[in-house]
Image: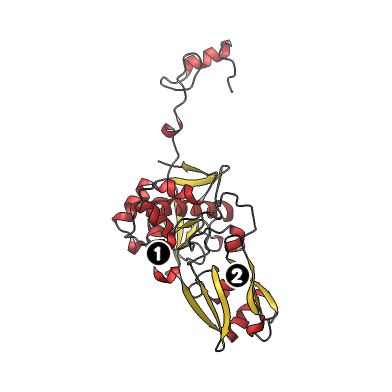
């Protein structure tokens, strides 16, 4: 029975019978505890599929997040950068479980495969990682009460991309991504992220384009290779390769993320039977930039301030103590 008016006799009778110490009640009830003092729930235990052995084990969420942070970021970096990574890793995990049921084909909540879920390497956990995860324990990022797509990349080339530009992601709106924000990461990142060059044999490019578009681009030559469309941040959103227009993000996947380091391309041309590209950055450039996080952490920014630099109109909430 839900009590609405404490003045009613039946309500008074029930109030008198409630166990001593109950905080909620009728006349003279204490005010609700502030949000930071309320019970935030219990830390979940998840089922983690170990791809290397084929085993599934139960593991506490925070222990799992330690292994993810250790695999995704240099463990010698500032603790606050690692802690920002922990917030996003925790958010990513919970969103995947909520939206997709984790990794259903293994009947698990997560897997140790970076292709299927996210990187995981408990052998790299050190005191920095433990501190970073502990200081952000239970913290997740939400937009309008739902988990965000907690994207991050190694180096955004100095300018953040939208999800549509950097990832060709249009499944849902992502207004919380701060596209166009500049973080100065280029000033501190390694030389290969400041400017890189990659060469791909034309036969390899032709196969990649056919795999992406479903059509043979035909003969690829100097006259039919160019950047067809640049996105708002300057990235090569679409390239003309032979007879085909191909999305930059899709082509990068087909040619290899490590070789075509980003779609933040400066030039593309044909030379000696190869497609040659020059560019900057490493990764899709959407969400948090890890090198930018390192820079801000060194400047004294908190983990939460780092996350808020890359995402807007969000809340960072503590889901368990």
Report x, y in % for residue 26: 51, 16
For numbered disc 2, what is the local secondary structure? helix
Model colouring: secondary structure
Q: Residue at x 51, y 75 (%)?
A: 278
Q: Which residue is mark 1?
A: 189
Question: 305 left or right of 123?
Answer: right
Task: Identify the mark at residue 248; answer none if there is no mark.
Answer: 2
Please say whether residue 280 is visible from this viewpoint: yes
Instruction: Count neighbours of disc 1 (C-alpha within 10 A) and say few if under 14, some if 14 to 19, many if 20 or more.
Output: many
The alpha-carbon separation of the residues under discs 2 and 1 comes to: 23 Å
Query: Which quarter of the rendered picture does the N terminus lie within?
Result: top right
Report x, y in % for residue 305: 43, 46
The image shows residue 85, relative to residue 242, as above or below, that is: above
The image shows residue 150, relative to residue 243, as above or below, that is: above
Q: Residue at x 45, y 59 (%)?
A: 48
Q: Which residue is outermost to the left? A: 127
Q: Residue at x 57, y 10 (%)?
A: 9
The numbered mark, 2 or 1, whose residue comes first in the sequence reads: 1
Number of the front mark, 2 or 1: 1
């Amino acid at each position: 029975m839900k009590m609405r008016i404490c003045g009613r006799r039946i309500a008074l009778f029930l109030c008198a019978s409630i166990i001593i110490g109950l905080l909620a009640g009728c006349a003279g009830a204490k005010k609700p505890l502030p949000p930071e003092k309320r019970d935030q729930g219990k830390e979940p235990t998840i089922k983690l599929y170990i791809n290397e052995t084929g085993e599934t084990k139960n593991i506490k969420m925070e222990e799992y997040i330690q292994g993810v942070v250790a695999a995704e970021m240099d463990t010698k970096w500032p603790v606050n950068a690692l802690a920002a990574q922990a917030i996003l890793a925790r958010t990513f995990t919970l969103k995947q479980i909520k939206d997709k049921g984790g990794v259903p084909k293994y009947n698990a909540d997560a897997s140790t495969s970076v292709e299927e879920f996210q990187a995981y390497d408990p052998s790299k956990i050190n005191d920095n990682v433990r501190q970073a995860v502990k200081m952000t324990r239970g913290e997740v990022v939400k937009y309008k009460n739902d988990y965000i797509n907690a994207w991050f990349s190694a180096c955004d080339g100095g300018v953040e991309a939208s999800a549509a530009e950097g990832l060709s992601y249009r499944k849902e709106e992502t207004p919380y991504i701060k596209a166009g924000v500049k973080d100065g990461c280029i000033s501190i990142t390694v030389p290969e992220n400041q400017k890189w060059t990659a060469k791909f044999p034309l036969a390899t490019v032709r196969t990649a384009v056919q795999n992406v578009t479903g059509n043979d681009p035909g003969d690829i030559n100097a006259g039919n290779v160019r950047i067809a469309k640049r996105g708002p941040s300057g990235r090569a959103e679409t390239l003309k390769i032979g007879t085909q227009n191909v999305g930059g993000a899709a082509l990068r996947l087909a040619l290899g993320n490590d070789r075509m380091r980003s779609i933040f391309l400066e030039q593309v041309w044909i030379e000696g039977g190869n497609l040659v590209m020059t560019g900057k950055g490493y990764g899709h450039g959407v969400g948090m930039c890890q090198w930018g996080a390192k820079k801000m952490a060194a400047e004294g920014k908190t983990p939460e301030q780092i996350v808020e630099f890359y995402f807007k109109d969000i809340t960072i909430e503590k889901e368990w103590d």
